[in-house]
Amino acid sequence: MERAKEAPTGRGSVAELGRLSGRAFAAAPPPLLVVTGMISLQVGAAFAKRLFELAGPFGISAIRLTVAATVLLLVWRPSPRMEPRTFLVVAGYGAVLAGMNTSIYLAFERIPLGVAVTIEFLGPLTVAVLGSRRGLDVVWAALAAVGVLLLSGMDGGLDPVGVGFALLAAACWAGYIVMGGKLGDRTTGGRGLAVGMAVGALLVLPLGVVESGTALLRPGVLAAGLVVALMSSVIPYSMELEALRRLPARVFGVLMSLEPAVAALAGLAVLHETLGALQWLAVACVVAASVGATRTGRRA
């Protein structure tokens, strides 16, 4: 396994920052890590949406993943030596990261942030329901379906292409949960995350170059991309990965169930995207369904 092969980090270098970051994460309460990472992710997503006019969703996603990968590689300094099975896990993790980030940005371009994340949340909810064998699963699935139906009643309707991208992001999020657990088992610290993020960046960067061209090299775009990368990738994924190692799956799932509500609030605060009473009820239905599925599911 990779943890047995990694070389020690040097003192007085950027790698020292990685060790200090790891210690800080280890000292923080896991629930605080989850909630802080969630807020950072959704506020970062709202800022990213405001940048689409400058570089487009593919371009911003490419900058986000590339900057995040660079920062994580400098901080964690992963060893180039890795067992084939470990690399397959890391590469799979990077692939679902790329798919999740790109597809949800394409959804943000067409539908409100809170709506997109609520639909995206069907991914982890499906994982929770499929991981259980209890009769209440039908209730939680039905409650989530009611939430999605309520979202479809928005004034002017929802862009079907945007909904499709949000559903694709949901499938990728389900894969992220599965691969994230395997990544935590086979790597230590943020080293596997750093390599996985690099894989994701390599997959998305060509699409960003085709869409945005030299706009990706503008200083203002790069600076904004750095902020988005830190808020939407480096901080939340590092915190979630550490929390996954220390929290029971049920507790982590309950905390993550707040994600649609946090996204809706971020959309309101940063983008001034307002939801009607029925849409807030839809968000509440999905959150309640996720909490219920997590609490009554089998112990993972």
Image (cartoon, rainbow, N blue to C red):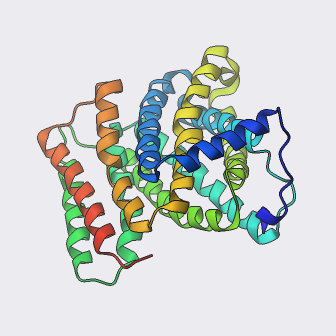
- Which residue lies at the image location 87% right of the left edge and 59% below the top edge? 81
Q: Quadrant of the C terminus?
A: bottom left
Residue 191 is situated, as x and y percent measured from the top left of the image, at: 72, 52
Residue 85 drawn at (x, y percent):
76, 71
Q: Position of residue 134 (x, y in %)?
A: 28, 83
**Can the viewer see residue 69?**
no
Q: Nearer the viewer, residue 224 or 119?
A: 224
Relative to 261, is 89 above or below? below
Q: Is residue 24 above or below residue 221?
A: below
Q: Tell which of 289 and 30 is nearer to you.
A: 30
Camera sees residue 269: yes
Query: For this view, does 80 lie left or right of residue 165?
Result: right
- Residue 232 % position (x, y): 52, 38
In the image, taking residue 34 as reference, residue 269 lies left or right, namely left
- Residue at 33% x, 84% y: name it: 133
Q: Is residue 184 left or right of residue 51?
A: right
Q: Residue furthest left?
A: 277
**Residue 124 sits above or below residue 40 on the image:** below
Asked which quadrant contains residue 89, the reply is bottom right
Residue 253 in the figure: left or right of residue 247: left
The outermost residue toward the front is 27
Count of labels in the image: 0
Residue at the location (23% across, 42% down)? 157
Q: Quadrant of residue 141?
A: bottom left
Name the residue rendered at 78%, 69% in the picture. Answer: 1
